[in-house]
Amino acid sequence: MTRLFVCAAQKDEVGRDVARALKIEVKKQGLKKLLLGGEKRKVRIQTCSCLDLCKQCKKGPGAALLIYPHGTAYGNVRPRDAAEIVHEHLGEGRVVERLRID
């Protein structure tokens, strides 16, 4: 299973908005189930209280996002970034470098 954890600890609720946008895009782009290495993997998006990436979500206008099991972390993610993350990362297997954090 591929899981996208979205920090929802911001005061302005942007994390919840990002999670909603990701869910819509996964469904819209037909990627609720991914074919990875010959096997189907379900995609799940969920909010969480903290990813310990506070610099990326409390000080900026976006949320922090962690994709597991890939281990890719994104910062300052906004709802408008959902389509690109779903298409590039989940669909094409490419990291969205402009949002990637270490």
Image: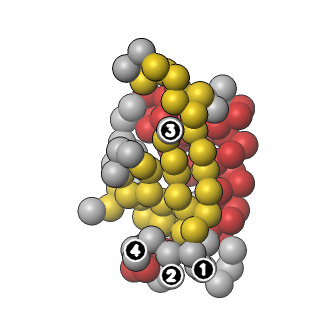
Q: Say which of marks 3 and 4 sits in front.
A: 3
Tell whether label 1 touches label 4 (CB within 8 Å).
no
Instruction: Judge whether residue 80 can be spotted in this image.
Output: no
- Pick the front one: 40 or 102: 40
Residue drawn at x 50%, y 81% is 58
Residue drawn at x 50%, y 75% is 50
Residue drawn at x 70%, y 62% is 17
Q: Position of residue 73 (x, y in %)?
A: 38, 57
The residue that disc 3 covers is 1
**Residue type at numbered disc 3:** Met
Residue drawn at x 66%, y 26% is 30
The residue that disc 4 covers is 53
* Cα–Cα gap, marks 1 and 3: 27 Å
Tell whether label 3 touches label 1 (CB within 8 Å).
no
Q: Say which of marks 1 and 3 sits in front.
A: 3
Query: Around disc 2, counting alpha carbons within 10 Å, would you say few (fewer than 14), some (14 to 19), or many (20 or more)?
Result: some
**Residue type at numbered disc 2:** Lys
The residue that disc 2 covers is 58
**Residue type at numbered disc 4:** Leu
Q: Upstream in the sequence, badge 3 or badge 2? A: 3
Residue 10: assigned label: 1
In this rendering, the count of numbered labels is: 4
Q: Upstream in the sequence, badge 1 or badge 2? A: 1
Query: Around disc 1, counting alpha carbons within 10 Å, would you say few (fewer than 14), some (14 to 19), or many (20 or more)?
Result: many
Q: Upstream in the sequence, badge 3 or badge 4? A: 3
